Amino acid sequence: MMYGLRMIAGNLLSPADPPVYDWIEGNGAASCLIICEHGGNALPAALGTLGLPSEDFRKHFAVDIGARTMAETLVSDLGLCGIFANYSRLAADLNRWPHAADTFAAAAEGKPVPGNLNLPQAEKDNRIARLYEPFHARIERWLDDQLLRNRRPSIVTVHSFTPVLNGVARPQEICVVSNADRRMADPVISAFRAARYAVGDNEPFDGRKGISATFNRHGTIRGLPNLMIEFRNDLLRDESRLMPLYRDTRAILHAALAGLRPAA
């Protein structure tokens, strides 16, 4: 069965569609931006459902389950700035480079995404221009403003991952993803381990292998402190575990931000 499959070469977004992102300004002294690239599961009406049943957009391959709630609560309680994507990663993956092979996923955990198969370049360019670049341009404007104020802002991206992928269980409860800059990663990993979480240091996702366009584009290239935190999504769906996890994360992130040191 084929579901709502459409293609569009013109204006991708209509006035009835949601905005590309939601922005929270934070307090005036906030010098950390919390980013949630996979926090939404909407699609522009022009794309239909990309040929998938609507229930698929509640699954991990369409949205990072629980990540937006975690990110929004951290922003609110710590007085930080935040940006949250509203559209599904299946429309355009905001955590990939614009022309990467998986920016428009042809398959989702082995399941074909009909609306992303054999996309003409004009369609890719349209989605990049309408969905991808506005999100990243807003981040860049904020960073530029921070630097004009003689601040050295930090970037933290928040994601979630599945307990099992392709039949393989993932023992990590939290994955801290970083590149060469370890100013945030080292204290955050140590603190989560001290709190008795099973923490992967670049496992199961390795930031040294280019998996994150966001913290590399906005953090690494500018020499700014940056970090990606991935939470196993069964923790975010379990009320008995979510609140302790949230309280620990808030305290650990607050301490890491307070203890940042200049780059070596």
Image (cartoon, rainbow, N blue to C red):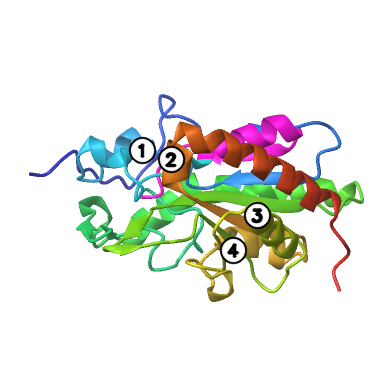
* N-terminal label among 2 and 1: 1
- Mark 1 highlights which residue? 43
Looking at the rendered structure, the secondary structure element under dot 1 is: loop
Give the quadrant of the N terminus. top left
- Mark 3 highlights which residue? 192
Looking at the rendered structure, the secondary structure element under dot 3 is: helix
Say few, some or many: other residues with alpha carbon within 10 Å of mark 4 (under 14 / 14 to 19 / 20 or more). Answer: many
Residue type at the position of mark 4: Val
**Residue 20: x percent and y percent?**
51, 38
* N-terminal label among 3 and 4: 4
- Asked if disc 4 and disc 1 are in contact, CB closer than 8 Å, the reply is no
Magenta segment boundaries in residue numbering: 68-90
- Mark 4 highlights which residue? 177
- The residues bearing labels 2 and 4 have C-alpha atoms spaced at a distance of 23 Å
Residue type at the position of mark 2: Tyr
- Asked if disc 2 and disc 1 are in contact, CB closer than 8 Å, the reply is yes
- The residues bearing labels 3 and 4 have C-alpha atoms spaced at a distance of 13 Å
* N-terminal label among 4 and 1: 1
- Mark 2 highlights which residue? 87
Residue type at the position of mark 1: Leu
Residue type at the position of mark 3: Phe
* N-terminal label among 2 and 4: 2
Q: Nearer the viewer, mark 2 or mark 4?
A: 4
**Residue 121: x percent and y percent?**
35, 62
Q: Residue at x 70, y 57 (%)?
A: 188
In the foreground, 243 or 52: 243
In the foreground, 101 or 62: 62
Q: Nearer the viewer, mark 3 or mark 1?
A: 3
